[in-house]
Image (tube, rainbow, N blue to C red):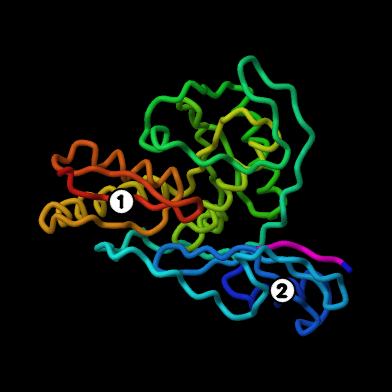
Amino acid sequence: MPSLELTAKSVEEARKTAADKLGVAADQIVVTVIEETKGLFGKVQLRVRAETADAAPVAAPASAPISDEPKAEKPKPSRAKSKAKTEAEPEPVAEVAVAEVKATEEKPTRGGRRPAKPAADAPAPAEGEEKGEVSDIVATEEDAANLLAIVQNVIEKTGLDVQAQITGIQGRYVNISLDGSQAGYLVGKHGEVINALQYLTNIMSNRKYDNGVRSTIECNDYRRRREETLTNMAVKIAHAVLERQEEAVLDALPAFERRIVHKALQTVDGIVTYSEGEEPNRRVIIGPAN
């Protein structure tokens, strides 16, 4: 029987969404939790596989048992952790379920770049790259056009009145801006949708081209406002760290937002920043230099 992979905020929401998509009753859906991600403000995001009850069972990894109950949180290090609000004003909400991205055929690589790896996700940035150090990868006009085509294809499938255009190239990053009467729906509450769109675009590009080039997607000036919020938050927490002489552990942030925090504190005397953990739960640590 058919099955699909999607993301949801809870098992029940995943079951209902899968039932609608597969055209069966919700009680006929079996949900397997593949991954559970805890984001800002303790919000939980589940990546699940859903199938009809008479389908063959799907084996889950040992770290993700099949259960309708939420998994218990692991104890966190005894560090002073900031709970400061880090989000900009909420934007219109769009419910999204992203189907599993299928690996595309390999494309010839350009000189000096690694051959394509069809099953690899977008690689996590190294610490130096995360802190904004110069990469030897430089995006070309062709790379920009390829990323734009991916974004336009995704937007077209949403049926929204939104247009995408390239606004610039900075090193390995291609800046893409979204505009249109319904563009707000592609921001989402706390930027959830635009972050998911950017992440999906980079995964699809990495699987198809494997050239190290990535996109940054802006919509309704959200990125600029978000950068201001993160910068103000980071400076405020840094001053508290200096006063207490204790480390502060921020909530998990995507790589491009971790770069904003590192950059904001580069010139603050007596402060060091570094990241620890694995994606998508990698966190910035702000600590005293001595």
Stretch of the chain drawn in magenta: 2-6
**Which image quarter is the C terminus in?**
top left
Which residue position is annotated with label 1?
285
**Residue at image point 47% right, 63% down:** 189
- Identify residue type, mark 2: Val
Q: Nearer the viewer, residue 283 or 61?
A: 61
Q: How far across and how far down the image is residue 289, in percent?
A: 18, 43
Q: Residues within 10 Å of mark 1 (few under 14, many from 20)?
A: many
Quadrant in which residue 246 is drawn = bottom left
**Residue at image point 73% right, 38% down:** 118
**Sequence-earlier tag: 1 or 2:** 2
- Dot 2 falls on a residue whose secondary structure is strand
Query: Per the image, is 277 magenta?
Result: no
- Classified by dominant secondary structure, the portion drawn in magenta counts as strand
- Identify residue type, mark 1: Ile
- Is the residue 78 above or below the residue 132 in the image? below
Q: How far across and how far down the image is residue 126, in percent?
A: 45, 36
Which residue position is annotated with label 2?
31
